Image: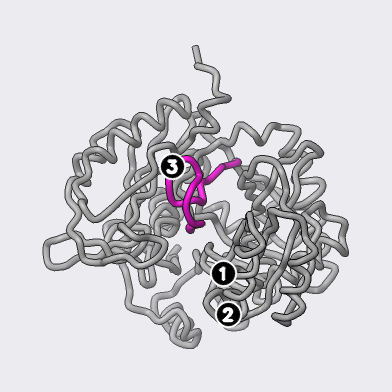
Amino acid sequence: MNVLLIGSGGREHALAWAILASPLLGKLYCAPGNAGIAEVAECVALDVADHAAVIRFCREKRIDLVVVGPEAPLVAGLADDLTEARIKVFGPSRAAAQLEGSKGFTKDFCAEHGIPTAAYANFDNLAAALAHIESQPLPVVVKADGLAAGKGVTIAETRQAAVAAVEACFSGALGDGGVVIEEFLEGEEASFFALVDGGHALALASAQDHKRAFDGDRGPNTGGMGAYSPAPVVTPEIARRAMDEIIWPTVKGMAARGMPYKGVLYAGLMITDSGPKLIEYNVRFGDPEAQVLMLRLKSDLLSALLATADGVLNAFDVRWYDDASIVVVMAANGYPDNYAKGGEIRGLDAAREVEGVEVFHAGTARDGGRLVAAGGRVLNVAASGRTIAEARERAYAAVARIDWPGGFYRSDIGWRALQREKPKP
């Protein structure tokens, strides 16, 4: 079967890498892709915001399945238009994608269906939001209501920081305006994923990522500076509760609203003393969590995506390697703020020679014969191993072989897991 993958980041490179291994695959296209994806798929200069152009391409190339990687095309209704054109798609409808596209929608949905989450208030008026801030205990969490590329959340330790975060939300710098103000939850964060076909849900492996830019979980929030799987904090009991208390009520509630969810549902969880609570939903695979999940996935990814799109998950299961996996993000100096592009990157072949290592491209391009940085998060150096410690050692050994003076990375990815991990015999 022919597949069109939408996206251009490290998540999409990892998905392309996994799809390529499927015996079902005929031809893999990616729009727009990047320099790494071009090594495993045919990249096409297709404007994914032009849904009519995407549909024409699918018909010309006889595409059997479209896999939408990032959230923006889903929130814009690409899945709806493909479905109307009778082109099979992996990804939720515009209505269902509100679970990520509007944090206010999700919080109200959680309240309606008894899904455990932080206490909150929604505002579409700056003055009212600022007045509410004055009455809240610190720290307080301020979230831009719309899409903000992973950068719309501020944990404000001071009243001044909270005010600045609220003002930024209404300035247009983060999303389209509107803000959700939440209580601060104590606990440990984890990423929980499930495939959902509208009526059935299938839990995937757990993961944990690192949002802050610098070591010690310091600095600004980013799209993610690294991740690992499995997440030791997600015990079998926590996973069961996440499905029973969060995922299943969401699947049933969305179906009851007439907007059944189909695709991968990514629940950002806070594991508290009283159990898992939902921080936020994303309507696509995480980035960089997809990278570590793909390394551990034993089953055929394309079959799983197809079963989801076809609504037959009740007769499907996925298997995972026992090995752990970890990914270290190499980002351009200055990220997530102002950063330079165009710096040459060398040494990727040497990095891939380290046992268990795959290098996924996130923001790269070709300039003649040179590989150059073309984004904020540029490379994802991923590795598997019998333990988190072994995977981590391999990943950092590979990072050390990459010659890119214009980049930086965190040196402490996986530190929480290392504290819990027991050596395997």
Residue flagged by tag 2: what amino acid is it?
Answer: Ala
Foreground of the two, 387 or 126: 126
Question: In the image, what residue occupies the spot 44% across and 86% down?
Answer: 53
Callout 1: few (<14), some (14-19), or many (20+) C-alpha neighbours within 10 Å?
many
Q: CA distance from mark 2 to mark 1?
A: 14 Å
Residue type pointed to by label 3: Asp
Element at badge 2? loop
In this orientation, does residue 10 appear? Answer: yes
| Disc assigned to residue 76 | 2
Q: Position of residue 133 (x, y in %)?
A: 74, 67
**Disc 3 vs disc 2: Cβ atoms closer than 8 Å?**
no
Q: Point out the tag, 3 or 1, that comes first from the N-terminus.
A: 1
According to the image, label 1 marks what residue?
89
Q: Which residue is mark 3?
A: 215
* Left or right of 233, for residue 59: left
Say whether disc 3 or disc 2 marks the residue closer to the N-terminus. Answer: 2
Measuring 18% from the left and 45% from the top, which residue is drawn there?
Answer: 347
Give me the residue at 82% from left, 55% from top. Answer: 115
Horizontal and vertical percent position of residue 161 = 60, 63
Foreground residue among 124 and 311 = 124
Question: Magenta segment range?
Answer: 206-222
